[in-house]
Amino acid sequence: MLLEMKNITKRFGAVKALNDVSLQLEAGEVMSLCGENGSGKSTLMKILCGLYPHGDFEGQIHFSGDNIQAQTIRDTERKGIVIIHQELALVRQLTVMENIFLGAELSRFGMVDDETMTLRCQQLLARVGLNVSPATRVGELGLGQQQLVEIARALNKQVRLLILDEPTSSLTEQETDVLLGIIRNLREHGIACIYISHKLNEVKAISDTICVIRDGQHIATRPAAGLSEDDIITMMVGRELTALYPHAPHQIGDVILKVENLTAWHPINRHIRRVNNVSFTLRRGEILGIAGLVGAGRTETVQCLFGVWPGRWQGDIWINGKPVNITDCRAAIAHGIAMVPEDRKKDGIVPLMAVGKNITLAALDQFSHRLSTLDEAQEQQAINDAITRLRVKTSSSELPIGRLSGGNQQKAILAKCLLLNPKILILDEPTRGIDVGARQEIYLLINALVQQGIAVIVISSELPEVLGLSDRVLVMHEGQIKADLINDNLTQEQVMEAALRSEHYA
């Protein structure tokens, strides 16, 4: 037995985040840890990694026959337990090599041995299938590439148990395949893996066993072979989710947004076009999905619409038939556009500010009357309504939003956008890192909004999600729109073909 966690209980004040949870893991076993956001998965892993020191929780941890009483994460790393968090812990200003060897630099004759480290770094990058130079700054890489750097960094440590928290939430399908291949390779070398993910197809593909936690309690650990996705969902949420993508009938009205010849240049390499002459329309009550591989220019397009693209851009935008000039997000909001950004930690929330204050941040003028201060009672009422409407799980609206799970942070950002009463709502990766139950709640909300006549643009790297939600799908590739497809039983193959066909003609 490689790992045994016995009767783990963890309290935060009066709240029991974990209640008498036990799990076991053999060497070379891949275990998937499943559960809704806020079920206690990440808390359990933080205990295992020493982020919550011994004495801060009840219960015992045995690893490779030793009783572990870790005080810091360094203690567990020395044992060979390495965690890769969902929120990446890389230093953006440093190079790939400097990040991989941070705190574990190789030296020769008392000097840092750059040559050996570069060589070793190239080997590690080849192992994770990442084709970048060791001298590249991490900040210049996409989220998916950064995730692979994190994995390379973990492999550089003498890992015996690798914990991956939502590792594929930012990865493309190709990068995900590489990652699953890496995990299979580790398994062959006797390295165990705990895999936390909401993507049940991956969980099924990679796991030997599946452990389900709900509301801080261990529900079951079963062999993956005998479980269907529906079985896992039922154990996770305690209820059956019938259709994941709700299809409520909604009326599609007149054109509300028209974009013509939108072109955006890279903020640093100004000769590179990230968006190249894009034109499309959006109608009232329509859900427009934008599909494409990472780097296709999807996020850049909507950032221009919302006035937050950091580089130079040009193009014509009409809202309700009138030309508009959007120079910043204030102008976009004034024209009735709201956006849920891709990177919620960086662009969506103020982590140390209370949940409630985050929700009302963009709409404070609604609660302040001329020549008067803020009407706090009215603001609090709006906060309570928003938290109830979007089912944000929080012990108090005063709690710092950074302490909520990813799914609940996302719901709070959605609540913030809805307070602005938008005509057009842009959702960039709205369900990244979010569990099945919360996903369905967000899908139901999107459906409710379009029934009110709000137009919605959805960007998602998950094709089933784009196809499950959208009335129409724009397929982008290398900054251009390659296809505008009505979603009449569209298949993933048709969308991918439209995206990649361009490579033959490029």
Image (tube, rainbow, N blue to C red):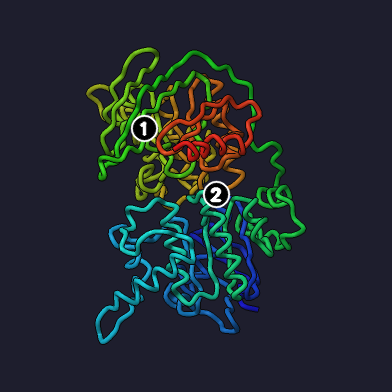
Tell me the quadrant of the picture where the C terminus can be found. Answer: top left
Nearest the camera: 213 or 506?
Answer: 506
What label sits on residue 276 in the rendered view?
Answer: 1
What label sits on residue 413 in the rendered view?
Answer: none
Outermost residue toward the front?
505
The amino acid on which the numbered mark 1 sits, given as a three-letter code, is Asn
Which corner quadrant of the image does residue 312 belong to?
Answer: top left
Q: Is residue 39 left or right of residue 474?
A: right
Q: Position of residue 79 (x, y in %)?
A: 50, 79
Task: Please report whichever mark, 2 or 1, sits nearer to the chain's N-terminal start.
Answer: 2
> At 48% across and 70% down in the image, what residue appears?
82
Q: Position of residue 92 (x, y in %)?
A: 32, 57
Which corner quadrant of the image does residue 147 belong to?
Answer: bottom left
Q: Position of residue 439 (x, y in %)?
A: 57, 41
Separation of marks 2 and 1 at Cα, in angstroms: 24 Å
SS for callout 2? helix
Q: Which residue is mark 2?
A: 173
